[in-house]
Every structure is written in C-alpha cells, then in structure tokens.
Amino acid sequence: MKVGYDAATHVFRLDGADISYVLGVNEKGELQNLYWGKRLDAQDPFAAAKSPGGGSGFDPAVNLTPTEFVGWGAGLYAVPNLKVTFPDGNRDLVLHYLSHEIQGDTLRVTLKDIGRDVRVELLYEMNAETGVLARSAKIENHTKLPLTIEEAFAATWNLPSSNDYQLRYLTGRWAAEWKLQEEALHTGKVVLESRRGSTGDEVNPWFAIERGAQPDQDTGDVWFGALGWSGSWQINVEQNAANQVRVTGGFTPFDFAYLLKPEQSLETPKFYGGYSNSGIGGASRLLHRFELGSIVPGGMHRKLRPILYNSWEATGFDVNEAGQETLAEKAASIGVERFVMDDGWFGQRKDDHAGLGDWYVNQQKFPHGLKPLIDKVHSLGMDFGLWVEPEMVNPNSDLYKAHPDWTLNFPGRPRTEGRSQLMLNLARPDVRAYVYGFLDKLLTENDIAFLKWDYNRNWSEPGWSAVPIEQQKEVYVEYVRNLYSILAELRSKHPNVEIESCSGGGARVDLGIMRLTDEVWPSDNTDPFDRLRIQDGFSYAYAPGVMMAWVTDSPNWMNNRSTSLDYRFLSSMQGSLGIGANLSKWSAEDFSTAKKLVAQYKLLRPTIQDGALYRLISPEEGSEFSVTESLSTDGKQAAVFAFLHSSQLGDGDPRIFPRGLEPATKYSIHALVGSLDSRMPERASGEYWMHRGIDVSLRGDFQAMLFTLEREGAK
Ligand code: GLA
C-alpha cells in the first residue's frame, strides 16, 4: 500500500482496507478534502480541487471550502485548526500548500503562512488493516520572534453536504459512565469537551455520525473518530447553513496558550477517523480491531487479559498480609490468574484522607514488606498486581509536608481538594523524576506483573508558578506529555509489567492512554444490571478486550440490588473477566459455580476479547432484554449472552437473531448457562440460526443465559 499522488491534478489518495481518503490543493493553494468513505476503484478519477468561491459578501470563500487544516485569518468563521498571536499584534494566519513527502502509507503535507515563516506539517498515517486514518499536525515557528498559539486542533474531518446526519457521543459521570447520546445534526455547533485536565467522564473524546437514522445497527454509512489525548480536549461538530459538516478536534482552546519560540514546534495529539458502511455496529467493530491491532501495547501480539482478582470491594483500605493471603488462596482455587492488591498498602493510609504520595510499604500492615505476599501469590500459580495513584498527594502526607509547591496551585490562593487530595504538577521536572523514581524502584525491588494506575480527581487551580508567566498555561500539554513519557519509560525498563488505566472508573479512557496501558476500568459501578448499559455504551468506542469487568458481591454496594452469581458472572464475562467479591463470605456452592464459569470463560476468552461484537438487543431505554454476540476472528465460534431484567405480564422472550455466520455452513448450538427453548434443533445452517432465529427460555427477574454456536468440523 502506498499513498497515491497525481502531479497533474495535485491530488493525493490514501486507501486502506475498505476506505479511501482523497485530498487536493486548490488553485489558491488551500488543502481541501475531496472524498472520505467507501473504498473506490483505483482508476476512479478525481479532478483537481477547486475553491468554491464566496457565497456572498457575508461568507468569504474560506468558509465554504472543506479545508483539511485552516488558520484563523482571511475571514474564517468556522473553528480554525490554528490561531496565533504574533508579537507585533498580527493575528492573521493563512496557510497554503508548500510541499509534501510520501513514505509508504504515510503522507506529510507542509503548509506555510502566505507571509511569515510559520509552517504546519500535517501527518496522515493510513492503517492498512482497517482503513482508520491517524491525523496530526506539527506547528513550527521559523520566524525570528516567539509567537503564542491560542488554539491548536489536530485535524478537521469533512463530510459531504447533507441534512440528515445523526450524531452519537458518550457522556457520563462517576459510577454512571458511557451513556450513549444520539441526536440529529442541524446548522450550528455541538461542542464535546473536557476542561478537567484529563480525558474526563462527562464526555468521552469519541464521535460517530451516521447518514440518516438507520433503525438497524449493522447497515448505513457511519463516519467516526476518536482523539488520542488524555488531557483537556475539544471536538467541534459544525454544520454550516450550506449543510457542510466539519469535525475539528484537539487541545481545548479554553485556558490554552503555548509560547512557541523561534525554531520550536508543537505537536498536536492524533485524531483518528474511520468509516463503515455496515452501520454503527460495523464502525465499532472496525474501531475495536484498530485498537487491539494497532493501539494497545503489543498490538496483534498482545496477550489476552488474565482473569484477575482484586481485593478493593472485599477489604477496602483494610489490607494486611494475612487477609490478602487468605483471599489469594481462595482466588487461586477458582482459577484466577492474577491477584491484585488495591488501595491501602502504603504510607499511613487508613482511609482516603492520608498517605497518597508516600509510596513506602506500611509497616503495620506488612511488617516484612510485600515479598511474603508476593511469594505466596506466586506459589499459588498467580502473578501479582498492585494499585497505585502516582499523580496525587494528600495534604496529610510526608511528601506534601516536604514539597507543598509540587502541587498544581496559584500561590496565595486556596487549593481545592477532591477526595481529600491535590494534584501533583507532573509538568515539573522534579515531580516527574520523583514519580518515575518511586515507580521504577517499586517494580525493580518487587516481582510485580501489573499496576492498576488510578487517578481520582479532576484539576483545579492549574497554576505552574515555577515558569515564566507566558508559559504557565503550557501545563496542560507538558503534564500529559510527562505522564506519557513516564509510562513509556517504565514499560521499556520493565517490559513484562502490564498497566490498567483507572480513573475512579472510566474517566481516563482514550486512544492516547491506551497506547501505553493494557486494559481500562470502565466504571466503579459493579452492579451487574447497571453494567449492561455501561458496557454497551463503552463498546461503541472501545473494545471489550480491554474492558475490565468484576464479579462482585450481592446485594451490590451501589444500589442494594440482589442478583444470582450466574447473572453476575455472565454480565462480567462480556468483557475481560475479573473477580472483586469478598471470597471469605462465599459458600461451597458459590465456589463451585465460580470455578465452572471461570473455566468456561477461559475457553471463550479469545472469542470474547478478540472477536467481533454484535449488539443484538440493546439494554438502553428501559429495555427488558439485552443480548450481545461475540464472533471469533476465525468465525468458528459465536458466544451469545442474553439477559432479562424482569418478566412482564407473561410476555415471552424475543427471538434472538445472531449475525455474521456463514449461511451455508452448519453450526451446533450449546447452552452453557440457562436453557434454550426445548424445540430448538441441536444443529442447523448459519442461514437457519440467522433468519429463523433462536428461542430461549428466560423467566423471572435478573435472568441470564449463555450459549454458543460452534461451526461444524471446527475445534
Ligand atoms: C478508585 C477506583 C477503585 C478503587 C479505589 C481505591 O475509586 O476506581 O476501583 O481502586 O479508587 O481507593
């Protein structure tokens, strides 16, 4: 695969998988989009780009041009990709094509201001396997004086003019993350944003736009995108009065300023975009494949997620050697592969009011250090993981007493606490060195296979008084860069250590952090019924293969809801299975149920974690049912999870229609948990299962079943 370029028309073309992306330089020198969508024939012609001309005196031409990257200047009213102030007061910036470079599937186009030597190198990287395009920009100051960047967006995605677009995005809050929002686009602007210093859970940096409101998950044209950035961000979805749609994303301009000295540059985050003509279902399957194959560490060669046990809901902060060892023995007996000790093991940590920042082992709780526990966990055949929250400090800690200036703050102003903690300013080199240093020491001195990296508050008073005033707002960029560099350095020095991104639940999940972590924690809400909706929303943007899901106690601590162990397991088995229950309270029967289901999960693990997800019945909008299907990458196995909230008025169960099977091939059906309708055959064609459908027998409240379809001759 190679980027195509036609010198006669000045048209560039990137093809990947089922997607083509075409752009060109118009007669004015502006770079504009010509096409983004389904893969076209290699011979299909594209005429040279042409500026549309102004609509009227009120709309200079630049507003109607589907520009790929545009400076604020020349009468632009749409969101610019770049806005700067020069030291002489000039704020006009008009970027025209200067040069390009093609290397395999990567295109670099350099734009330059019409007068001053400010350049922007646009990077286009086409993913051959999925057609997902990664776009970013490098802004370079080659003038003799510093300039201030006030707005810097990575890229703009242009969609063809249409008046029936539907926008989807994800919103939430603590313990209620991943709510899917759907609305019609009309003239105006939808701003998706985090001003919280990190990705945040109020809105996630992902969008999907469908042409027409398709009733079916797996049909229709869908364009989607996601930002790879774990700091404050913004995505603008604009539809102008001519129904042209532009999606522009990158750093949020709110409270943003970046001083670019002569010969310095600023790189934006990557903004990924893709397209599917198999509906929103096809779009998320494509994005999942891209994430698993090209974003998470190891890509195609990544390890499947081990089944872990985590002590948080069982013990809270009350961890100690004997208690953890007892839990470890019980966890090992049901087939758990990784034992993780959560919060409470360090400093003077008894509750969430003290200890963060003091990363030494608490002597009362672990008089002999962590080694005896780690040895015990290993002797039980599991590896060992540990909770940390490296970016935070409690005012009640040795670290804060020694370095009160290490936190984000404005001198002389109050410091707002969240969960009784303050944020360390990771942009500071001394703080970066401290955080890297203690983590490196912890991993060097102990045989630790896994870190649960937590982050339990948002920013406030984001002051960085150690640098000159005109650079203080750079904290938004430098903080995140240092976070990434710490993660990258730890991973390269300790290549066997895996990391989970947790932020009091799912408040830091994005394609930036996913490049450096192996899994994510979607929500602190572990109620298995609430989780069906949370997991459903999560799956629009992120792969089930990175989504940790624990089986916890009943009744659930969040809402006092009681559910069976089978139900709790099946809800969690839709993602990467973990156990977070208090095993000391389990009955012999619970252990045998768990042992059986853990063994079944291990057999289905590649299908669930790597396979293609089909959302057959959505749990949204008060649905009594929820059904998902995971189809293995080789097509040999489908695992179907079906959940009933509550039988109503004697209504029957809806028929289940699986997808993605080979029509003419025979599949056998196997109920692993719960039962199928007794009239179901044991084997039939893919055609039969997909079109005649499958009847199950779910009655009562909070019922769940799991069945598989196995392709004949396969194993
Ligand atoms: C956050 C996490 C939880 C747990 C606690 C520990 O809330 O999301 O899973 O680790 O912190 O304090």
Image (cartoon, grey):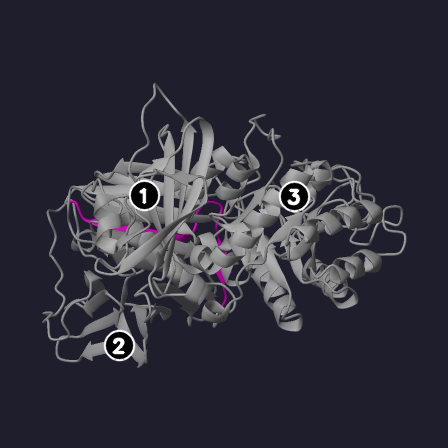
Q: Nearer the viewer, mark 1 or mark 3?
A: 3
Magenta highlight range: 243-261
| Residue 166: percent from left, percent from top | 24, 41
Q: Earlier in the sequence, mark 1 or mark 3?
A: 3
Q: Is residue 342 left or right of residue 188?
A: right
Quarter of the picture holding the C terminus? bottom left
Tell me which amino acid carries mark 1. Leu
Percent x, y for residue 427?
Answer: 62, 57
- Rendered location of residue 657, percent (x, y): 27, 44
Label 1 sits on a secondary structure element that is strand
Question: Depth check: 243 or 328 in front?
Answer: 328
Instruction: Tell me residue 383's x, y (percent).
Output: 69, 61
Q: Residue at x 77, y 62 (%)?
A: 379
Q: Residue at x 62, y 43 (%)?
A: 456
Task: Tell me, yes or no, whether the two marked residues, 2 and 3, touch with CB atoms within 8 Å.
Answer: no
Residue closer to the observer: 31 or 183? 183
Residue 202 visible within the image: no
The quadrant of the image that shows the N terminus is bottom left
Q: Secondary structure at mark 2?
A: loop
Judge by depth and name the residue closer to the eye, 210 or 266: 210
Residue 3 is marked as: 2
Q: Secondary structure at mark 3?
A: helix
N-term-proximal mark, 1 vs 2: 2
Residue underneath mark 3: 591
- Which residue position holds label 1? 616
* Label 3 near ligand 1 (CB < 8 Å): no
Mark 2, Cα crowd under 10 Å, few <14 / some 14-19 / many 20+, is many
Indicate whether residue 352 is drawn in magenta.
Answer: no
Q: In the rendered structure, which amino acid carries the disc numbered 3? A: Phe
User: Would residue 109 be visible to someone looking at this image?
Assistant: yes
Per the model, the C-alpha gap separating discs 1 and 2 is 38 Å
